[in-house]
Image (spheres, rainbow, N blue to C red):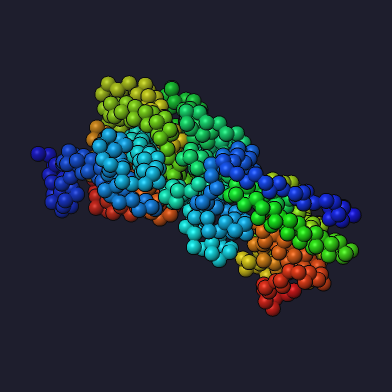
Amino acid sequence: MAAAAIMLAPLPWATGVSASDALFPLAVTDDEGTEVTIDAEPQRIISLSPANTEIAFALGAGDRLVGRTDWDDYPAEAAELTPVASFTGVNMEQVVALEPDLVLAAGNFFTPPDDIERMRELGYPVVVIYAPDVPAVMADIELIGSAIGAREEAAALTAKMATEFDAIGEAVAAIDARPRVFYPGGSEPEIFAPAPGSVVADMVTLAGGDPITTADAAAWAIPLEELIVADPEVIILGDANYGICPADVAARPGWEEMTAVVTGDVRAVDDVPVTRPGPRLTQGLASLARAIHPDLELPAFPPDAPLCEGAGA
Amino acid sequence: MTTTDLARERAAVRQGTFEALRRRPVVLGLIGLLALAAAVVAGIGLGSVFISPADTVAIVGRELLGWPVAETWSRAHETIVMELRLPRVLTALVVGLGLSVAGVTFQGLLRNPLADPYVLGTASGAALGAAIGVLIPLQIVWLGLGLVNILAFVGALTAIAIVYRVAGGGGRATMTSILLTGYAVGSMLAAGLSLAMYLSGSQLRQIFFYLLGSLSGADWQSLAVGLPVVAIGSLLIMLRARSINGLLLGDDTALHLGVDVRRERAILLALASLVTAAAVAMAGLIGFVGLVVPHVIRLLVGPNARLVLPLSALFGASFLIWADLGARVTGELPVGIITAVIGAPVFVLLLRRYRAGYQL
């Protein structure tokens, strides 16, 4: 079985990281291929994505962060940082006022490219972080570790995460079933679905499911007709945090025929750890695996807080 | 004194202080200059980061005018004033000025009060160009301008060139047929824009913000390219105020007054389009300025283009600086929303005051 082969192959991030010469000045190549020179160990770091913020905190550099985005909600201490970016882009005045010596931006247009360009023109080292799949998240943690002078912490974190991925992989491999899983990220106005090869599709595979994806990597929605033909056996509500519950899904025209709806295998999950490419990804994978396989035992991971109480599951 | 003058006199008594300005364009010009100066000072002094007025003045004085003042401020504050706020305020000034002058020109040429700088397909052309610029995965920078700005400029000019050619603007085409052709071509380009947006995936936000217009990307380089185009274009238009006045009376009358209608129309269209394209390339599609500022000025001083053009330039410039300041302090709301929210009620208020006697 293909999925099992993925489980058993040596994980690409499991290779060791040389934790030796963590010396500045330092040149790192970011995820867009730009070489960025960092003169000294950064003491005033701006993070421009919730994942970057979580990684910096997990690497013990939370006290060196000075700026964040409007969406940084974890850990709780992140709320005390100055917000410098919202959906309208980066507030350049605030960035300049914070006098950062490192900016951890986000790729794939999350941080507007014009703003990245502008910050570089203004002389700030900007490292762009973007993980297209799960192994890349581990690489990003190590990239951020290098950039902020916390290589050993990063190596320790990725090693711990690799162990956790392995543990979940083994538990999942013990179960024979590989249900067809649909993970909607929202259903209005279109049905938003994971693209093939995306982090979410990877996560569903690692959690022991067969992900139903969009037609290609550039498409983010799936037509209802195709979804009906794909016939999901399990529906995991990635939009449960936004008020969508199993009862809502059953009430949608066209959805009532899907196997998952007929058998009642529509379950909610907290999408943040599942989709945020940061240190809580293993926690997210555990939640996802338990949502796909309700009988799965993963005692190492804390139980999930119930979503959609009293409605389904 | 004719009866019209008498009627105006009575209206003046009834309508009070605003009407008094109608007779005093010089006073209005001085008010405009003061408003512009106040807008520039406020625009440089205020923002999301507090910098004391004394520091702001000292930074600008030292960096621009070489004042011998000691550096008591942080590098960050100097960067904010010199690299972020100053180019942004000046870009707002140039764009507001350009759009207002282009608005007067298009309204005069088309003899249509609903005309604005975007009416002949320039907006759709620029937007489609910008969208294509966003979608092309290349980082091209030419003269300090990104691909998006360059293609927006090219798109705006291409659109109007197509409209002019298709309508047969060089021949006997009436301005009505040019206007309608502009609408048709604009609709087609808008469909292309919708398609580009539909296919844009994660870049949709970038296109969307371009459509709403913003001055947040303003820097010295784009200002250095845009400023000469807008300044020279606007100046040349102002030198042709007499032609605009003639054309306002209708093609035949203009011809009898000695205006070479075809030639003047072509030149004015080209100049106004150039100014619009430069403004659009610098700041995206900022609506309402080019439509309303000329009308407000006409309500105040009457239809004479010799007065309307320079006064619109002055007030349009300060209006956009104020609107952009509003955008900045409200957390980067799109400036087009601010211009409409402030501009529309003011415009309606003035229209109600002067219900009688408005002419283009």
User: In the visual, does B82 lie left or right of A253?
Assistant: left
In percent of width and height, residue A105 lies at: 57, 48
Name the outermost residue toward the bottom: A310
Q: On screen, B69 above or below A236?
A: above
Count of numbered circles in the view:
0
Q: On screen, B40 above or below B306?
A: below
State the image quarter where residue A262 is shown: bottom right
The quadrant of the rendering that contains the C terminus of chain B is top left
User: In the visual, does B167 lie left or right of B51?
Assistant: right
User: In the visual, does B202 lie left or right of A3?
Assistant: left
In percent of width and height, residue A32 lies at: 63, 41
Q: Identify the residue at image location x=59%, y=55%.
A: A56
Q: Identify the residue at image location x=13%, y=51%.
A: B13
In percent of width and height, residue B256 lies at: 27, 23
In percent of width and height, residue A232 lies at: 80, 61
Name the outermost residue toward the left: B1
